Image (cartoon, grey):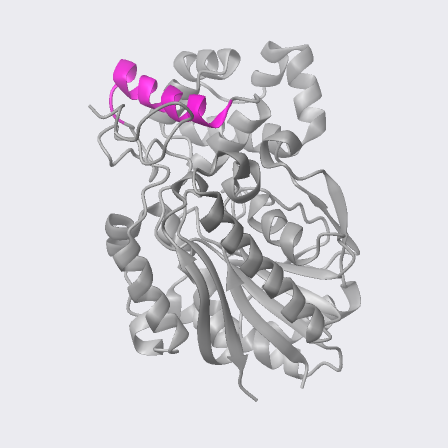
Amino acid sequence: MSLYQVQKFLYNLNRDQHVQEAFSKNKNDTLSNYDLIQEEYEALHSGDIGLLYVLGVNGQILMHYAAYLQIEWFDYLQLMRDGIEEHGPVRKGIYAMTGGGKQFNKAPGADVGKGEK
Amino acid sequence: MSLVYAGILSHAPGITGRAHLAPDKTIRDEFYAYLTKQRKDIESSGAESLIVIAAEHFANFFMDNMPAYCMGVGEKHTGPIEDSEWLQIEKTTIPGAPELAMRLAKSVMLSVDLAYSEEWQCDHGIMVPLSFLTPNYDLPVIPCNINCQGPPLTPLARVWQFGEALRRACDEQSEKIALVGTGGISHWPATPDSGKINEAWDRNFLDQLMNQEKTKLLSYIDEEVYQEAGQGGFEIRTLIATAAAAGGKGALQFYSAELPIFAVGCTVARFDVEQ
């Protein structure tokens, strides 16, 4: 149920400017409306894309959230890889990484496959 | 005769948002040229409204109340919900076609339990296609979403029925209507695997889709799709519904797996609208 709450907060944040304004003014107050465990609360409070990915947040929700945070595309992909490195495999949901960390497209100034593990 | 055009196209956010990062500008621009051709074909058809069958990406609904099928029946729609700079599409208002949409919804409901919404918000799944097909946002749009994200997902046989119901509903109207379906084929969007494309799977599916091979199209199993085509593969529902609505065979106008920065096999196709 807790992942559901994480995703519901992000869903509301992604599509509702009033939630965005409230969250930017007072993160604690906004997050208090959701039934979160400490790990989830901290991930949302700090915008920890890597941990949120590992927790199992749906990729469409997470991608829109990263856009809201104005995270550059290749940074977003790397943050998810870093999250797996730090926290282990994706715990729930259908957005688990399947490519073993391989990069499937080329970041500016990088060679495809450079980030392969 | 009221359905005057039916086609499909890709909608991945990178198509607009990461256009500048495409290493091969020639293939990118060829893709864009076919999207422009699709716009011109729709304009030439005389279409007065455009139905977009898209995939719900949590722009309108969450798992507290997730419809299998929903139609936007409002006077207007807004979008994109995403950061405009990220998507490279300005926030705008899109005209709806409320009277027509209500008539369509009423007809579709005779055979499919359709939800409806007067407060439709568009994400990249609809905004990217519209940015090419009606860049001035002056063509009335009726958005229809299929839940392709939050399992349990609607069975493919029901998707086919939805497409057929939508076609019957269009045929009852006097207005000229265009219809496009927009979904990915194999792709692993919004994950570290972004850019992974199973081209052989894509081409096999598209061949079946263009040839209206209904039995094969309805035989896909979500668990196998997930393994071979990723979670993004669930969006084949939008394409199958469009084929069912069109009734006639399709012509694949463009496909390329050579633009992984767009995170999907980029596709444009047109169906014959069987009378």
- In the rendered image, the vertical position of residue B161 relative to residue B28, given as above or below: below
Tell me residue A81's x, y (percent): 32, 22
**How many circles with numbers are drawn on the protein?**
0
Taking depth in this image into account, of B24 and B152 the one nearest to the observer is: B24
Query: Is A76 colored magenta in this rendering?
Result: yes
Say above or below: A22 vs B256: above
User: Can the viewer see residue A35?
Assistant: yes
Q: Quadrant of residue B104?
A: bottom right
Q: In terms of secondary structure, what is the magenta stretch mainly?
A: helix
Q: Which residues are magenta?
A: A72-89
Q: For the C terminus of chain A, which image quadrant?
A: top left
Q: At 59% across and 36% down in the image, what residue appears?
A: B87
Which residue appears at 79% of the width and 68% of the height?
A: B99
- Is B14 left or right of A14, judged from the image as shown? left
Q: Where is residue A85 drawn, in percent x and y?
A: 26, 17
Percent of width and height locating residue A111: 31, 27
